[in-house]
Amino acid sequence: MNFVCGIDGGGTSTKVLLRWENGRRLEKRFGPFNINSIGAQGLEALLREIMDFLNTQGTCCGLCVGAAGTSNANVAQILKAETERAGIGRYLLVGDQDIALRGALGKTPGMALIAGTGSICLGINAAGEKKRVGGWGHLVGDEGSGYALGSAAVRAITHALDGTGPQTVLCKAAEKWFSPNSRDCLVRYVYGGDKSRLAALAPAVLDAASHGDAVSQKIVEDNIQALCRMAQTVFEALGFEQAKLALLGGLLEDPFYRVQLQACLEEQESHITCVLPYASAVEGAADMAQDLNEA
């Protein structure tokens, strides 16, 4: 039986959704997708496992893979080789923001703002024109993200310890991860792992801000302003008079952070309306696979 397949390749797991012509659905999870974490051989093994699974389910007539890091040429090369080996002729490789936008709004013009460990805003207008802002990665961008909040928190803690900045309850809150009274512990924590370590501090920043810590409130305000600028830039670039903005990503699931963003947009008298996503990113990938099959 013929089916289409959408793949949402995440950093911790990969979601695969199969949809048959008769309405049957099947969702399955596999390991992490990010080539920067698992390497080329790891990605090849993952895709081979997924393709072998698809071949046990029938004939795949359309496949859409959405993932971060698709600008890496190795990802496209490995996907091409594995789809050819599996006999899948119609496939599409796009960024994770593309499937997130499609899942969130369907084919309706609008925008999606994603703030998790990183951040990005993507929009599409009625003419099919797209505009992307952000997604530059934590070293040069990702304003408004969990990493940005955590990084700012660590700087605030070090300034408080040195006496060059105001005191903050973040020093106490961060004891879950490291002792702020020990430079060695702080340095080992910050430099002893990947960016997720700093992103893990974001909930502590939001909690402290919601309870009145001035330093945390300033961190949140600065990052909310950055997210608003991203959304407004996409809005203006695509010539919208009004638009829906789907809020996505773990950080924007936090009620406090989400309310701050909505308030910021309202203060700017923006014609942007924040909405919940209609469906998930993997559903968006499956929709795009269906489009490919019908083309």
Image (cartoon, helix red, strand yellow):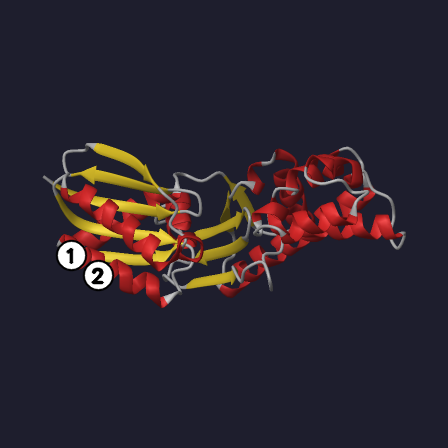
Residue 224 visible at all: no
Is 146 placed left or right of 294 in the picture? right
Q: Nearest the camera: 51 or 39?
A: 39
Tell me the amino acid under the disc marked 1: Arg
Rendered location of residue 76, percent (x, y): 30, 63
Which dot marks residue 291? Answer: none
Residue 216 visible at all: yes
Q: Confirm or deny contact between disc 1 and disc 2 (CB under 8 A).
A: yes
Of the 4 image quadrants, the one containing the N terminus is: top left
As drawn, 108 above or below 71 = above
The residue where tag 2 is placed is 81
Secondary element at image label 2: helix
Q: Residue furthest left?
A: 1
As drawn, 283 above or below 73 = above
Is 200 placed left or right of 215 in the picture? left
Is 274 placed left or right of 278 in the picture? right
Q: Nearest the camera: 284 or 199?
A: 199
Q: Residue furthest front?
A: 184
Is 111 placed left or right of 187 in the picture? left
Name the residue located 65 percent from the left edge and 38 percent from the top edge: 203
Report how far apart the C-alphas of labels 1 and 2 lie in the structure. 6 Å
Tell me the amino acid under the disc marked 2: Ala
Secondary element at image label 1: helix
Rendered location of residue 193, percent (x, y): 58, 50
The residue where tag 1 is placed is 85
Name the residue located 19 percent from the left edge and 51 percent from the top edge: 62
Name the residue located 50 percent from the left edge and 40 percent from the top edge: 275
Q: Nearest the camera: 168 or 102?
A: 168
Name the residue located 17 percent from the left edge and 52 percent from the top edge: 294
As drawn, 55 above or below 142 = above
Rendered location of residue 46, percent (x, y): 30, 48
